[in-house]
Image (cartoon, helix red, strand yellow):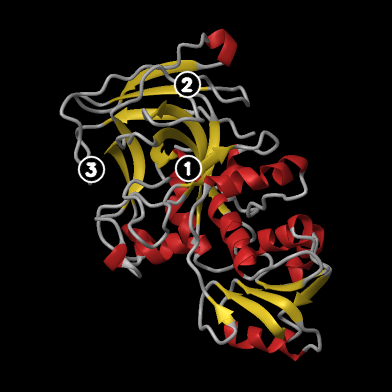
Amino acid sequence: MQAFLAYSILTNPCSRSFFPRPATRPQFLLSSVPAARTGAAATARRCGGPGRSVVTAASSSPAVAAVATDVPGTMKAWAYEEYGDASVLKLDEAVSVPAVGEDQVLVRVAAAALNPVDSKRRMGKFKATDSPLPTVPGYDMAGVVVKVGSQVKNLKEGDEVYGHISEKVLEGPKQFGSLAEYTAVEEKLVALKPKSIDFAQAAGLPLAIETAHEGLERAGFSAGKSILVLGGAGGVGTLVIQLAKQVYGASTVAATASTPKLELLKSLGADVAIDYTKDNFEDMPEKYDVVFDAVGQGEKAVKVVKEGGSVVVLTGAVASPGFRFVVTSDGSVLAKLNPYLESGKVKPVVDPKGPFPFSQVVEAFSYLETGRATGKVVISPVP
């Protein structure tokens, strides 16, 4: 498990922040757990000017340190105040910790993950329905609950959770996302983290596994049916393969990828691994009950679907009988799939170049946007 509580709480009135600061200087309290039990040590140092001090708590234990007795007023977060490429992202060291609604929990983020929709949002592709700028991006996260709202029923401080924090990806996503030390999220959007996976692995799951699940559900996929996954080595594709085989009982799972990734497809449960650099799947004789297109080849996908079948399209052109949908975040879906994650029947796939440290979020986005990532691009530890 990734060591989680290696965090810095920085008060920096000298630096420019995109966000309003608290009216009073926050009081920072470290965990009350003795250092002898947690392996933690705290140091404080002056860092070049009045009012600038850093308090750092670091744990050598692989377990998560105990919940702090108080939550700071400010936090480190990546943010942007204008739309554009990855260069608009700036590390802000004095962002106000988001307020917690009655039905929400405040999570100290241990790891976060990037998704293509993060890039599209940052570039202003759906600015008409976006939350106001400036924005702390990020949908996916895993971490520890440090505060609960008055109407929260099933979660408590200290619970390890994971989830996709905006119920509607494109319609008013949260202004304070997961690329921060803390994020506030509705209880119904998260689930307890499976104990068998670490925070980095868990952070890479929510949006991708919910997309895979909802697409299969909307396509009417069921036991005994066949499926072709286009982009089988990507964040969503790796999970479609596994859910189709392990959860739905597919008769045949075929998937496409480049030559170096074919063995990965087979290890995830693909019966047929198609090298798209050598073979054109649309010219092959096989037809499938469902084609799940995660890469934007909808016009070709409809050529290999059986009569009466379905084509799930995540990006690009849609041709009949293809359809597109926007995923809805739902913690109950994560809870339903947790047993498969606990047992190892469904495995998270984190890109081998990661996890990227919190300081390299810009580099992580640049890598994601090459379209060559395997599985999920994860940021860990946070901060």
Q: Against 299, is 125 above or below?
A: above
Q: 217 or 265: which is nearer to us?
A: 217
Name which residue type carries label 2: Val
Q: Quadrant of residue 292?
A: bottom right
User: Is residue 259 or residue 49 the one in the foreground?
Assistant: 259
* Residue 153 to residue 237: above or below: above
Query: What residue lies at 60% left-to-right and 46% top-to-bottom?
Result: 334
Labels 2, 1: front one: 1
Q: Residue at x 61, y 25 (%)?
A: 63
Sequence-wise, which precedes: disc 2 or disc 1? 2
Residue 17 is marked as: 3
Taking the image as drawn, is residue 141 in sight?
Answer: no
Give the mark nearest the N terminus, 1 or 3: 3
Q: Position of residue 202 (x, y in %)?
A: 60, 43
- Rate crowding at label 1 as few (under 14), some (14 to 19) or many (20 or more) other CA atoms within 10 Å: some
Q: Which residue is mark 2?
A: 67
Occupied quadrant, residue 127: bottom left
Closer to the camera: disc 3 or disc 2?
A: 2
- Which residue carries the number 1 mark? 188
Q: How many neighbours does mark 3 have within 10 angstroms: few (below 14), some (14-19), or many (20 or more)?
A: some
Q: Are marks 3 and 2 in contact (CB under 8 Å)?
A: no
**In the image, residue 36 above or below residue 229:** above
* Residue 119, image x, y percentages: 42, 63
Q: Residue furthest left?
A: 23
Instruction: Point out the tag, 3 or 2, that comes first from the N-terminus.
Output: 3
